Image: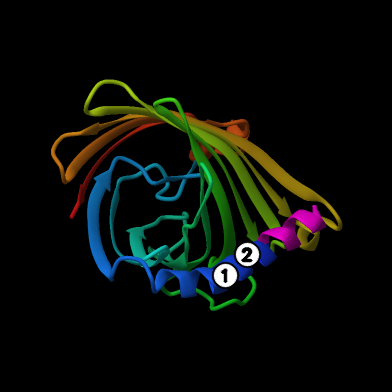
Amino acid sequence: MKFLKLALVAAAASVAMGGAAMAQDEAGLKLSYNVGVASDYIFRGISNTNTKGQVFGGVDATYGIGYAGVWTSNVDFGTPNPDQEIDVYAGVKPTVGPVNLDLGVIYYGYTKDKNGAPGSYSYTEVKAAASTAVGPATVGAAFYYSPEFPGEGGEALYYELNGSAPIGEKLTLSGAVGRQEVDVSNYFGGASDSYVTWNAGVTAAITDHVSADIRYSDTNKSDYGSIYHATVTASLKVAF
């Protein structure tokens, strides 16, 4: 586990430095925008809006293989604060043979948070993902490592296998199976907590800029409360 964590950090750092230079030779700066609504905000199988609706939006910039962006959504963790999530992320997407890589860093920030104090929701993750085409389908794997999870949690690792395949001209079937592991020794003295999550759904390209998604998601921790329960989420997204 320790070796994997160090490898993820080292890989992201080395490729980011090398990728920044290679990006200078690629296409120029491009900006894209997205806004949308959903019946729930499901993140790794858990509702981040307390099973209520979601409104979200973001801005992304790409330059060669490099990218950066900002994304925001309302949240509801059952407490008065925070009520808004603001994510900032950056990374590179190089290609090695038939494999597409995505190496980056994500900061999950929350309004009216405690700024790193005990009970804070904000945290940072390092991301390493890879995908490749298998016939008309795409299969991939992703790893996310955080040195300090929200609240008083310690190190955390999330990893998943995912895939997608077109079904017709405007429909795409996709799904993923993942596992979240968190060191909670600060709470339970050397213990760790984990759960498994999975999802499957269909995305429809209504126009070149508008898409709709219907997705089933669940976890193996439904006894933890309603935010872990199986749910079907509908969303509509506009990207331009």
In this view, the residue in front, 192 or 24, is 24
Q: Is residue 23 left or right of residue 124?
A: left
Is residue 229 among the parts visible in the rendering?
no
Residue at image coords 53%, 76%: 114
Residue 164 on the magenta span: no
Q: Are marks 2 and 1 in contact (CB under 8 Å)?
A: yes
Q: Is residue 221 left or right of residue 201?
A: right
- Helix, strand or loop at mark 1: loop
Residue 3 on the magenta span: yes
Residue extending farthest to the right is: 190
In this view, the residue in front, 21 or 14, is 21
Residue at image coords 42%, 31%: 164
The percent position of residue 41, horizontal first and vertical second, equals: 38, 46
Residue at image coords 18%, 55%: 240
In this view, the residue in front, 193 or 93, is 93
The percent position of residue 167, horizontal first and vertical second, equals: 31, 21
> Residue beneath label 1, please?
120
Mark 1 residue type: Ser
Q: Is residue 234 left or right of residue 197?
A: left
> Residue beneath label 2, please?
151
The percent position of residue 203, horizontal first and vertical second, equals: 30, 32
> What is the chief secondary structure element of the magenta stretch?
helix
The segment highlighted magenta reads 1-8
For label 2, count other residues whose C-alpha is less than 10 Å away and answer few (under 14), some (14-19) or many (20+): some
The percent position of residue 231, horizontal first and vertical second, equals: 42, 30
